[in-house]
Amino acid sequence: MVKLIHTLADHSDDVNYCAFSSSCLATCSLDKTIRLYSLNNFTELPYSPLKGHTYAVHCCCFSPSGHILASCSTDGTTMLWNTHNGQTLAVLKQPRGSPVRVCRFSPDSAYLVSGAADGSIVLWNVQSLKLYRSGSVKDGSLVACAFSPNGNLFVTGSSCGDLTIWDDKMRCLYNEKGHDLGVTCCDFSSQAVSGGEQGSRYFRMASCGQDNQIKLWLISLADLLGCELKYEFTLNGHSAPVLACAFSYDGQMLVSGSVDKSIIIHDTKTGSILHTLTQHTRYVTTCAFAPDIPLLATGSMDKTVNIWQFDPKQHCAGSGLEDEPKMAIENWSEEEVSVWLCAQGLKDLVGIFKMNNIDGKELLSLTKHSLTNDLKIESLGLRSKVFRKIEELRSNVDSVSLGIPDEFLCPITRELMKEPVIATDGYSYEKEAMENWISKKRRSSPMTNLPLQSLILTPNRTLKMAINRWLETQQKYNETT
């Protein structure tokens, strides 16, 4: 199961990109700013937003260590920021001042690539902050870039549809028309793939484009001078141009975002669709997996960034468990409980839980008494937070065991809705639960925590009909079993 756990709505214009480090989330926007959030509770860092660009910010990325953040803009610059205090480290000006569309660090942090609207590519030396090498694509704007995990090569994608492979000396190794109507994004899987003749090893790469397609490719590591991009297969599902794609850190999942407003999570081995997410109200422009915890961030032209949480069991297995709703939390290992704690902003408790050998079954059995007396969690506030999160888990277990689709559950009560209504935040709730929420003088959305533009609740008849059909199906199934 994938669950929406937080919505960030601080940008005043389209969100163009989001990126994770091990401790932070960075987002950038047409509003000229970059914002940084702590992964513990998604609060904005004290020195955020970062301001320095004079026009829209198109892309941002962290160095592998997470100590430096790079951002690039229509203003023709790529800026480097200290992620500990938000201070500007450097302003790198693109030759001829062309708008910079994409930037990427090499895996060893030695270099930074910036690609621009005039097709120019610059390889910057991060230590000296000087231009190391430069080049350009044949036609179109440079809009996408990704380094191979070993750093020996990188791939660029252009608005004309070309995918070009470069080595770390800026020599063009290979060029191929990847997408007829233009490339929009590309990304490498961190996991090498074995196969082919004589046990050759490959890196898997994904690209997406204006042709509504996501293509998977294999790039041989055997001989870079004879490098070739080998088409593997196409992932389908989107009905409009695909603007973003990203691999999970174990390489087993690929997420994509589209003009059709949807996010699709694919199994990279089989090509099957694991999840389809549809909370954004405008084009989905960016998506990114967190490196160490089961989180996904998606950004949109609706000015928001949504944070999604995976069931840790699913994240570790790298498979879609929607077809296996009885995959119980009680089967979690101690390590998976640790992953869950980190996702809840409870990283400081990992040691205590491991010391007491808390696995999934033990987790579900914890009480306020055992948190106090057995685990010795002294802080009342911390105990209350842990217990509240465990209660949410128990509620999810009950829902999953019943096989109830998540969209049929009220976000407030986590129970099957009988009289669903739509609030002005765009989400559906059980009518009574939302009326009680409002009656307690709450004027904010239960989902986004933003002020509600109006307190009017509109009956969601379409959802009610869908729930009734599902109930009828369940009843018929029960009668035949």
Image (spheres, rainbow, N blue to C red):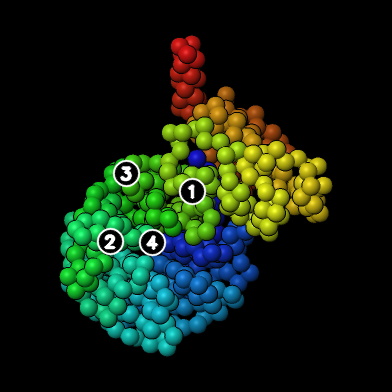
Sequence-earlier tag: 4 or 2: 4
Circle 1 sits on which residue?
315
- Give the amino acid type for the residue marked by disc 3 in the picture: Thr
Name the quadrant containing residue 104: bottom left
Q: Are marks 1 and 2 in contact (CB under 8 Å)?
A: no
Sequence-earlier tag: 1 or 2: 2
Q: Are marks 4 and 2 in contact (CB under 8 Å)?
A: no
Mark toward the viewer: 4 or 2: 2
- Give the amino acid type for the residue marked by disc 4 in the picture: Ser
Q: Give the Cα separation between the discs numbered 4 and 1.
A: 16 Å
Relative horizontal placement of residue 407, taking residue 184 as reference (left or right): right
Badge 4 local density, few (<14 within 10 Å), some, or many (20+)? some
What residue sits 59% from the left and 75% below the top? 84
Mark toward the viewer: 1 or 2: 2
Circle 2 sits on which residue?
202
What residue sits 63% from the left and 69% below the top? 46
Circle 4 sits on which residue?
190
Sequence-earlier tag: 2 or 3: 2
Sequence-earlier tag: 4 or 1: 4
Residue 352 locus on image (x, y percent): 71, 55
- Give the amino acid type for the residue marked by disc 1 in the picture: His
Do we see residue 246 in this rendering? yes
- Give the amino acid type for the residue marked by disc 2 in the picture: Tyr
Circle 3 sits on which residue?
270
Mark toward the viewer: 2 or 3: 2
Relative horizontal placement of residue 67, taking residue 374 as reference (left or right): left
Total marks shown come to: 4
Q: Are marks 2 and 3 in contact (CB under 8 Å)?
A: no
Q: Give the Cα separation between the discs numbered 4 and 2.
A: 11 Å
